[in-house]
Amino acid sequence: MSARTLLKSLLVYQAWANDELLEKLASLDPRDNEMKRRAALRLMNHIHVVSRIFAAHLAGADHGYTSDNTEETPEPAELRAAMAESDRWYLDYLETVSEQRFAEPVAFTFTDGDKGCMTRQEMLTHVVLHGGYHRGEIGRMLAQIEVSPPWDTYAVHLHRAEPSRRLHSKPEPLDA
């Protein structure tokens, strides 16, 4: 499997996982566990902002962010729409970037002023891993308030997206 094929699969998974978790957060009563709900939304917004920052780095554009989060905390529906748009952007980008540019290093500046340099492939990988890390944190927060988090794993996603993976045949008997 090529790196591009794997990244596409991971970006599709990320879009699914983001949507599943935001659907769960939208179902929570805003008055119950208000602080945990807000913290979870802040983390999802952080995932989104970092994704937008790295999209700008990939596009060679100014992202306009001065921090890795925003002052305001968006509501789940607004954030869900914004993240879905961002997830689509990444999938579209992956389809259009050439192999040469895929491996090309890109210099950039983090929001804290530190300098960085990563290949485009590394940036895409970072976006996926960064989101997974923070969705895991949010899952733990939900468990602490006795709310079942979505079953957010790559294996679950693959088997839901391709149910035929659950079908398997019995091995052929070995001839003696």
Image: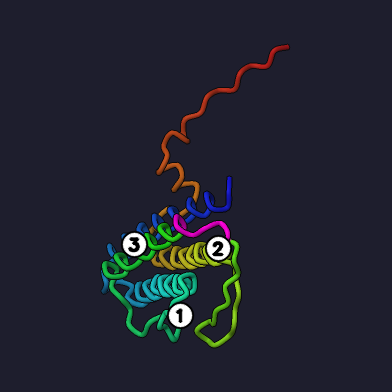
**Residue at which label 3 appears:** 84
Q: Could you tell which of marks 2 and 1 lies nearer the N-terminus?
A: 1
Q: Is residue 30 left or right of residue 121?
A: left
Residue 169, above or below 99: above
Q: Could you tell which of marks 2 and 3 lies nearer the N-terminus?
A: 3
**Residue at which label 2 appears:** 101
Residue at x 42% of width, y 39% of height: 162
The 10 Å Cα crowd at callout 2, few under 14, some 14 to 19, many 20 or more, is few
**Residue at which label 1 appears:** 68
Q: Is residue 103 magenta?
A: no
Residue 137, above or below 12: below
Looking at the rendered structure, the kind of residue marked 3 is: Ala
Horizontal and vertical percent position of residue 50 = 46, 74
Q: Could you tell which of marks 3 and 1 lies nearer the N-terminus?
A: 1
Residue at x 49% of width, y 60% of height: 97
Element type where label 3 sits in the image: helix
